[in-house]
Image (cartoon, grey):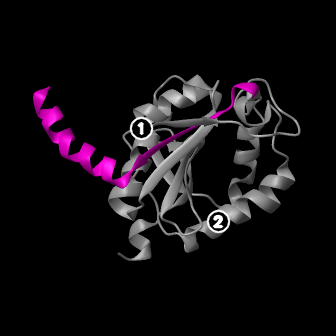
Amino acid sequence: MGDDQVAAPVGTERLRLRRLTMDDVDLLVELDSDPEVMRFLTGGVATPLATVRDEQLPRLLAQYDRHPGLGRWAAHDRESGEFLGWFALDPSEDGTEAELGYRLRRATWGRGLATEGSRALVRHAFDTVGVRRVWAETMTVNERSRRVMVKAGLHYVRTFHLQWDDPIPGTEQGEVEYEVRAEEWATAGQERPAARRAR
């Protein structure tokens, strides 16, 4: 399969996904400036513009060529074109696994967009890219994100504890890991058509 065929995941009914560019600095800085968006990541602390511009974006853009079909994509409302946030399939070093991620503006919460986009990315990861595993992590106390992971087809694997120099509230309850493997996805895919016929 040519690189151009796996450049980005297919969008969804309500979401248009595209590659990030250096022109997205201000959008990403604005997204990370909402304390609620960053609550379970930094305790609400915003990401500095210089960090986004000089560190994060250059690293993310370099992933597109190294691991076609994986990486991070800006998400826009398909009708209005409004920037909503981003979705990610961050590749492992060898590109055989991908970490599912999502960060959306607070105004979009509660509409099922995180689940909709995550399901599309998981499908893309297995059916188009051919990874062997998709996984995700969050804080144990982040119930909203954990629900998205389950709805996207991932299941709970473990709870673990990390040492932080500046722990945020909830750290004491640890982090959780969820995953779905290629063989599980293939089995679920065989079952989905029967389930649709039953409705």
Q: Which residue is mark 1?
A: 152
- Where residue 85 sits in the image (x, y, percent)? 60, 41
- Residue drawn at x 44%, y 32% is 150
Judge left or right: residue 1 versus residue 58.
left
- Where residue 114 sits in the image (x, y, percent)? 50, 35
- Badge 2 marks a residue whose secondary structure is helix
Against 101, residue 143 (above or below) is above
- Residue drawn at x 76%, y 45% is 29
- Magenta residues: mostly which secondary structure? helix
Q: Which residues are magenta?
A: 172-199
Against 192, residue 124 (above or below) is below
| Residue found at the very far bottom of the displayed protein | 2
Residue nearest the observer in this picture, 151 or 174: 174
Task: Report crowding for label 2: few under 14, some 14 to 19, many 20 or more residues within 10 A (C-alpha).
Answer: some
- Residue drawn at x 52%, y 66% is 95
Against 134, residue 129 (above or below) is below
Task: Report crowding for label 1: few under 14, some 14 to 19, many 20 or more residues within 10 A (C-alpha).
Answer: many
Residue 195 seen by the camera: yes
Q: Which residue is mark 2?
A: 61
Residue 83 seen by the camera: no
Q: Say what amino acid the circle numbered 2 marks.
A: Leu
Q: Nearer the viewer, mark 2 or mark 1?
A: 1
Q: Is 46 covered by the magenta stretch?
A: no
| Residues at marks 2 and 1, CA–CA distance in whole angstroms | 25 Å
| Residue found at the very far right of the displayed protein | 165
Judge left or right: residue 28 versus residue 195.
right
Against 55, residue 74 (above or below) is above
Q: Earlier in the sequence, mark 2 or mark 1?
A: 2
Judge left or right: residue 134 versus residue 197.
right
